[in-house]
Image: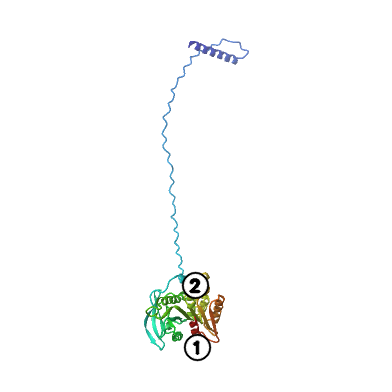
Amino acid sequence: MMNGRIRLRLLAWVGWTALLTACLPLATAPQDVVLPTLMPVAAVPEFPTATPDPTATIPPTHTAVPLPTNTPPPTLTPTITPTPDPYAGYTIDDLRARSYGDGTLQIVEVIEELPRFTRYLITYPSDGLTVYGFMNVPKNVDAPLPVVLLLHGYVNPSEYTTKAYTTPHADSLANAGFLVIHPNYRNYPPSDTGENPLRIGFAIDVLNLIALVQKQGGEVGPLQLADPTNINLWGHSMGGGVALRVLVVNQDIRAAVLYGSMSADEYLNHQKIFEWTDGRSGQEELAIPQATMARLAPINYLDDITAAISIHHGTADGQVPFSWSADLCDQLRTRSKSVTCYTYEGQPHYFTGAADELFRQRVLNFFTQN
C-alpha cells in the first residue's frame, strides 16, 4: 500500500519538474525548485447501485369508440299499384276461357197468342243481371225445333220496347217453324244495367243465352221444344257486330245471318260511332292501344269461325258502309269459310218492299239448309 503512494509521488514530482523546465527561459540558469508536497488522493466513494423502480403498470389502452353518425332514415319506396286493365275479362281469349249459363230462362207471361205461335215475355240471368226479351214458340209442330237468336241493332234505350223493330223478322221465322228468342240485352229496359265496353256485354248476354238453351233445351220447361244442338244467329247492324264476336268465341253455332252488319274491326266501328255522335262517343275506344285491340276485335279471329255465314247488305246503306260487308265476304272466302254474300241494289240500311221479301225468303232457305 505504501509503495504505491511513493510511486505516485515520484511520478508527480517528475512531471512537475519536466513542466517547469519547459517553461523557464533557456538563458536562465537552473535553480533549486521547491516542489509542493502532494496530498494523498482521497478514495472516490463508491455509490450504491441504483435499484430501478418497479415497473409501472400501464393502464389498458381504451379503444376509441366512434361517435354515432347521424344516419338518415331509409327512404321509403312507394308501393306501385298496377293500373287495372279495363278490358280484363273481355278479350276473345278471356271470353272463350270462362263459363256461361248460370241459372235458368223463365217465362214471365204470355204477351200474345198468334195463329202459328205464342209470344212470351222471358227473363234470364247474365252475369248477375236480369235480361228480358221475348220468345216465339211455334204451335202444333214436332219437336225438337231449330232455334234462332234474333239480335236487334242500335235503338236509343230510352225509346226501346221489347217488341222492337226487328219483331217482324222474328215472326217470319216463327211462322216457318223456328223457335225464336229475341233478347233485349243489358241496358235496354226493362233489363238491368251493366258494363258494356265495346258492346262486349251484349255478346256476353248472348253467350249466356246460348248456354241456357243448350242446358234447358229438350227438358221439361220453357225450352222443352228447343233443339239444343241446332242454335243459329240472326243479327242486324249492331246485332250483326254482336253476332261476329259470338261466332269467334262459340263454335257451337250452326249458322248465322249478318244483315247490314257492323264490322269485325272495332276501330272502323268506333270511327263511325264517333261520326254519328259528333264526337260524343267513340273517342275512348279509338284510343285503345293496337296491342290491346288486337285481343279484343273479332277481325283477328276470323279463322276460328265454324258456322255457315250468310251476308246481306244494301248498296244505298247510309249508316253502315256497304264496303264493310264486301270486305268481310272477301276475308271469309280467302279463309275457305262457308259464306254466301248478297247485294241489294239501292237498298237502305233496313230493306223495304220486294227486297225485304226476297231477303226473308233467302234467310228461311239458308237456315233450313243448314
Residue 107 pos. (x, y %): 37, 81
Question: Residue sitting at 48 percent across and 10 percent down?
Answer: 2
Q: Residue furthest right?
A: 27
Mark 1 is surrounded, within 10 Å at the Cα level, by few (under 14), some (14 to 19) or many (20 or more) other residues, namely: few
* Camera-side residue of 22 and 124: 124
- Count up the numbered dots: 2
**Quick check: 233 above or below 40?**
below
The residue pinned by badge 1 equals 357
Checking the image for residue 296, the label placed there is: 2
Res 118 quadrant in image = bottom left
Question: Residue sitting at 39 percent across and 87 percent down?
Answer: 112
Residue 292 pos. (x, y %): 50, 70
Q: Residue furthest front?
A: 142
Residue 62 pos. (x, y %): 42, 41
Q: Secondary structure at mark 1?
A: helix
Question: Residue sitting at 52 percent across and 81 percent down?
Answer: 311
* Camera-side residue of 16 and 63: 63
* Camera-side residue of 80 and 344: 344
**Quick check: 293 above or below 278?**
above
Sequence-first tag of 2 and 1:
2
Q: Amino acid at mark 2?
A: Leu
Q: Visible in this render: residue 86?
A: no
* Camera-side residue of 218 and 291: 218
Horizontally, residue 17 falls left or right of residue 145, namely: right
Q: Amino acid at mark 1?
A: Glu
